[in-house]
Image (cartoon, rainbow, N blue to C red):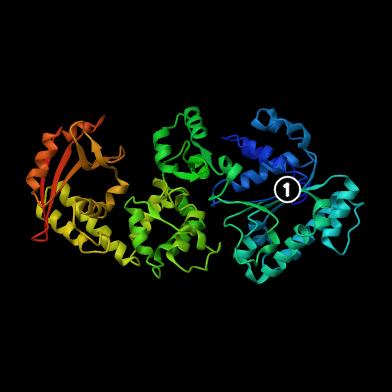
Amino acid sequence: MGIYLNPGNSGFERIVSGKYIDKTGLIDVVNARINTPNSLVCISRPRRFGKSFAAQMLTAYYDHTCDSNALFANRKISSLDSYEKHINKYNVINLDMAQMIEEAGDSNIVTFVKTNLIEEIKDQLPDVNIDNSFSKTLVNMVEATGRKIVMIIDEWDAPIRETPQFQDDYLKFLRTLFKSSTTTSKTFAAAYMTGILPIKKDGSESAVSDFDEYTILEPEEFAQYTGFTEKEVQALCINECTEFDLMKRWYDGYRVGDEESVYNPYSVMKAIGGKFKSYWRKTSAAENLKTYINIDHYGINEEIIKLAAGEKIKVDISTFNNDFTSFTCKDDVLTLMIHLGYLTYNEDTCEAWIPNEEVRLEYRTLVRKPSNFTLVSLVKTSEKLLDDTLAGNEEEVAKAIEKVRETNYAPQYYNNEQALRYCIKFAYIVCVDRFLRIEELPSGRGLADVVFIPKRDTAYPAIIIELKWDKDEEQAIGQIDEKKYAAALSGYDGDIVKVGINYDSDKKIHSCRIEKIRR
């Protein structure tokens, strides 16, 4: 066994020796493509979404130099028709390009790959004729062994992102392997590549144009293998005696194809037996988020504030060039954030939003940085507003709402109660992290305008806000009591703060009345 050529199954053996969610059904999807015109597959996913685990699994399954039946015997793939036909039947080349960049140092990455693979071919298969042409050497290897190659390239786009000086050589290398109608079909039974971003649109990466591409926006049959599904996480939480509701709040929220509830795999596994917190900040992806939030050439700050307030925003994903630099508008930046996992996206409504508590925590941390003056100012105003609300400082609450009303985050046409409600969302933006916000909560006798129910790991009271337009704040408070809005807080038995807010369109002022219910 080698490091890159036929590396065996030890990587997958290590994975399944711990807590493991069975994703071996992916093997059957790849098996269906072996030796077909659709045998080349390129998968793009955010960091920490299990791409490397999938690569290790496929390597263990296809590598002929090991017996992996014991690892797959009780897995889903073992019951499927394609299992016996392909298990441990191929030569496997497994390249983790991010790792190889580190190992190559300042060397040309292509030269490093070729040199190491040829050395391993000589070591494992001394009878293979080593040709001056690398692709011809691979053909010779297939002819000598009678086994085609399954090529697995993890982080295939890392050299393009991180070593641009070798980009042309690298793309030429891939083109030589996968663009030749004669060599490719003779050499490869299948190829499976993973990356962060989709293949670049401008054609400079046409070396991989023959691959069928599946992104987080268009995953098709690979959707259920993008992350963990709801059923998988529920079963894991039961087995590990972990609270499912908290797991869902922290790591769910991604919509991928037909899967409307997809969890971040890395974070789920870290949280099992550990703490519910953000595991993003330990990644380079978290540093990238800071860069994108600080970009305001296209009005991105305004969109970030809407997202942080719990809003969904429209995003046109069609103009994105599938790279980290070629931005022409805010939609390009937001589309990149979708591919990186900072946002999730609904193709039917063309809307994006922050998926869960983990990612929201990263936004909250970053928008408080001094470089984001506008964001920091709004957050500070909201922090004081929340404190004044809980303390019953009615005049200060009215002033804070007026201050937010004067920013760009209130509707341009401030002319009805709906506009006032929209303003309230931004005024109480800090509540997103600490409360569950419900708009128009049914009470049996009406709909409460805005209700903030404290999350279980906080000590805040609930807040019921009733809004009026050209009436008065006393009437708003009276409606909360008259229609028994407090009774609608099913399962909540803590204190409640009642807030009545009115806007006088003639005087152009807000007024506020606050009362507390002690329980």
Question: Is 481 in front, or is 324?
Answer: 481
Q: Position of residue 57 (x, y in %)?
A: 67, 41
Quarter location, residue 242: top left
Report the label total: 1
Q: Name which residue lies at 49% across and 59% down.
A: 336
- Near mark 1 (Cα within 10 A), the count class, few <14, some 14-19 or many ≥20, is many
Q: Position of residue 405 (x, y in %)?
A: 20, 60
Question: Is 420 in front, or is 115?
Answer: 420
Tag 1: amino acid: Ser
Compared with 408, 462 (above or below) is: above
Question: Is 105 in front, or is 114?
Answer: 114
| On-image quarter of the C terminus | top left
Quarter location, residue 396: bottom left
Quarter location, residue 224: top right
Classify mark 1: helix, strand or loop. loop
Q: Position of residue 27 (x, y in %)?
A: 68, 39
Q: Position of residue 343 (x, y in %)?
A: 44, 52
Q: In the drawing, does residue 85 fall left or right of residue 365?
A: right
Q: In the drawing, does residue 139 fall left or right of residue 29?
A: right
Q: Name which residue lies at 52% across and 68% down.
A: 325
Question: Is 167 in front, or is 241?
Answer: 167
Compared with 39, 239 (above or below) is: above
Q: In the drawing, does residue 434 fall left or right of residue 128?
A: left
Q: Name which residue lies at 72% across and 30% down.
A: 81
What residue sits right under mark 1 in the picture? Answer: 39
